[in-house]
Structures are given as structure tokens and as C-alpha cells.
Image: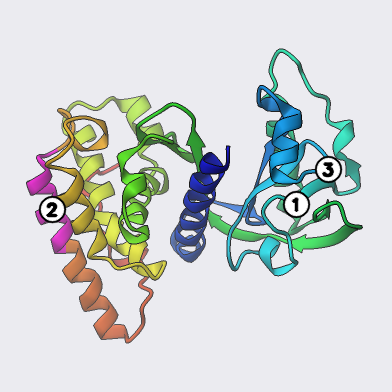
């Protein structure tokens, strides 16, 4: 359980950094407080989960993104959530036939409440007195990262990035793992999932969507303070070694061709940074998608 939490916390931290630093340029945004929860009762042995993580209730804080509103008010990993906007966690019913549902309901309640700019959060740290703080929400690109148990892939579904806990890229450096997440985030940012569901992947739609996700990677990385060259390194490292996943299919170019496309954009990112004297770049003004969505 600890290993799974560590992996998900790392993914959440990197994903939040990418999503928050690029929010000014995303059309699809959502408010967030910058923390992730999990429900001990959704595991096989809830008591052992509560004991391992020091929880006094079922709803624990799985991850807190550094620099997020949640972090700024002192919320920490393995704190216990007590109430949301005055609504006790106990009032959220647990379905024994769908133990995942309560956690989803609580996440939805937090997201709904954040729409007005803030959420009152009550929590306890290590069984101490309950803190009650109004947490301000910030906008991020709509693309929360979640870890899946027993899976080895990475994909975007339009609003989330789903990464398996056996995904090989979890062994990469933060910059190179951020490149993987940036690729999937680009699919969500550019609206590829909905477009491809409606129009299919033929006629170059699928291939151009992958090219655009590759090409946007270095822009997203640079704005988050990651090395834009990590997009190239990630592709060079992953591409030759793996025949499946997001890097090899009929809808994708060969990995070496993809490296060339990425390198072109890395050069453009650095040129724009040099011209403006700023590390962040408004890619929405410069990035020209190959996939034309009418």
C-alpha cells in the first residue's frame, strides 16, 4: 500500500505542476484545491489501511501537491478528512457493492463546491484536534492524474490521465515521467478524445492527434519548469524498448520520426524563451496543431 501511495503521490505532484502552470493557456480548466483522497474502506482490509497510514477515519489524504492551496493551509499526506463545507464525511453513504463510490462522491462534492472559489475543509492530523480552514481553489488544466492498480499503460480519457502502477515510465526521472504525462495531457487539452470518438481515427486524424500530443509536450514541460529536452530523451529511451502502449501502433509514427518532430518544437520553445526572456511561453499563441478540428 505504501508503494502504491508513493507512486500516486509522485504522479499527482507532477501532474498538478503541469496542469497549474499551463492553466492560463488551456481552454478546458477546472478549479482544484491540490489534494487527492482515498477511502480505506475500498481496500480489502480497511482496518489495516487505517493503521498503516495513521488515519482516524476512512477518508485519508493520499497526496498533496507542493505549492497548492491545500499545501499552503497545512494539509498533509495521511491526514484524515472529517468534513467538506460542514458536511460530515459520515453523511456520505458507503455502498458495500461498490466500495469505490463514496470516495468518488466526496471528490465530486469537493469539485462542485470549489466552483464558487473555495471549500471549507475539516481534517485531523495524526489524531490531533480538528482543523477547519477555508481553502481557496485555483484553476488548472482539466487533466487530473490517477494511478490504476494492476495496469501497465498510460492513457488520456478526455478529462483524466490514467497511469498503471506497472507502467515502465515510473522508473524514469521526474522530467522524463513529466514528458509522458505531458503527452497524455496534451490529448486532453487539445480535445482529441471527443474529436476522435465523433470522427474516428482514419484520414490521418489519429496520427495527427499523436503528432500534436508529441509536439505540445516540450511547451507544457517548459512552462512547468521541467527540461523541454526531456520530451526527446523520454521518446529515445522508451521508443526502442517497447512495442506497445502509446508509442507503437498504426496511429503513431515510428519513434525516431517522433523524436524529429519533438526536437523541432524544443527548438521553437527555446527560441521563444530567448526572445521574451521568460521561462514560460504562451503556447496557445504559437503552437499550430496539425489536426484541424472544424
Q: Residue at coordinates 15% horizontally, 39% vertically from top-left?
A: 241
Highlighted range, magenta: 253-264
Give residue 64's position: percent from left, percent from top: 62, 56
Secondary structure found at label 2: helix
Q: Which residue is mark 2?
A: 259
The disc label shown at residue 79, or none: 1
Q: Nearer the viewer, mark 2 or mark 3?
A: 3
Tell whether label 1 touches label 3 (CB within 8 Å).
Answer: no
Most foreground residue, 280 or 33: 33
Q: CA distance from mark 2 to mark 1?
A: 42 Å
| Relative horizontal placement of residue 238, taking residue 84 as reference (left or right) | left
Q: Residue at coordinates 19% horizontally, 57% vertically from top-left?
A: 233
| Relative horizontal placement of residue 36, taking residue 170 as reference (left or right) | right
- In this figure, which colouring scheme has been used for the structure? rainbow
| Quadrant hosting residue 219 | bottom left
Q: Nearer the viewer, mark 2 or mark 1?
A: 1
Most foreground residue, 102 or 51: 51
Q: Residue at coordinates 28% horizontally, 47% vertically from top-left?
A: 213
**Do we see residue 219 in this rendering?**
yes
Secondary structure found at label 3: loop
Q: Which residue is mark 3?
A: 56
Q: Residue at coordinates 23% horizontally, 75% vertically from top-left?
A: 270
Secondary structure found at label 1: loop
| Relative horizontal placement of residue 291, taking residue 145 as reference (left or right) | left
| Quadrant hosting residue 158 | top left
Amino acid at each position: 500500500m505504501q508503494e502504491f501511495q508513493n507512486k500516486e503521490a509522485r504522479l499527482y505532484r507532477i501532474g498538478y505542476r503541469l496542469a497549474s502552470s499551463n492553466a492560463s493557456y488551456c481552454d478546458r480548466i477546472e478549479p482544484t484545491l491540490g489534494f487527492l483522497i482515498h477511502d480505506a474502506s475500498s481496500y480489502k482490509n480497511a482496518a489495516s489501511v487505517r493503521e498503516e497510514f495513521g488515519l482516524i477515519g476512512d477518508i485519508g489524504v493520499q497526496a498533496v501537491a507542493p505549492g497548492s492551496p491545500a499545501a499552503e493551509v497545512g494539509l498533509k499526506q495521511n491526514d484524515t478528512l472529517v468534513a467538506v463545507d460542514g458536511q460530515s464525511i459520515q453523511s456520505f453513504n458507503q455502498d458495500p457493492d461498490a466500495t469505490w463510490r463514496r470516495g468518488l462522491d466526496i471528490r465530486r462534492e469537493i469539485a462542485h463546491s470549489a466552483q464558487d472559489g473555495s471549500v471549507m475543509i475539516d481534517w485531523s492530523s495524526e489524531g490531533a484536534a480538528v482543523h477547519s480552514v477555508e481553502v481557496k481553489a485555483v484553476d488548472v488544466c482539466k487533466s487530473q492524474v490517477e494511478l490504476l492498480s494492476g495496469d501497465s499503460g498510460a492513457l488520456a480519457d478526455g478529462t483524466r490521465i490514467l497511469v498503471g502502477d506497472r507502467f515502465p515510465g515510473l522508473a524514469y526521472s521526474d522530467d522524463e515521467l513529466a514528458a509522458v504525462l505531458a503527452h497524455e495531457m496534451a490529448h486532453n487539452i487539445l480535445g482529441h478524445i471527443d474529436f476522435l470518438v465523433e470522427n474516428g481515427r482514419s484520414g490521418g486524424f489519429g496520427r495527427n492527434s499523436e503528432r500534436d500530443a508529441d509536439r505540445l509536450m516540450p511547451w507544457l514541460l517548459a512552462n512547468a519548469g521541467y527540461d523541454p529536452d526531456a520530451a526527446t530523451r523520454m521518446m529515445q529511451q522508451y521508443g526502442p524498448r517497447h512495442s506497445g502502449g502509446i508509442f507503437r501502433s498504426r496511429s503513431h509514427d515510428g519513434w525516431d520520426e517522433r523524436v524529429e518532430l519533438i526536437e523541432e518544437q524544443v527548438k521553437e520553445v527555446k527560441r521563444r524563451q530567448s526572445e521574451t526572456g521568460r521561462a514560460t511561453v504562451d503556447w496557445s499563441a504559437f503552437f499550430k496543431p496539425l489536426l484541424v478540428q472544424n
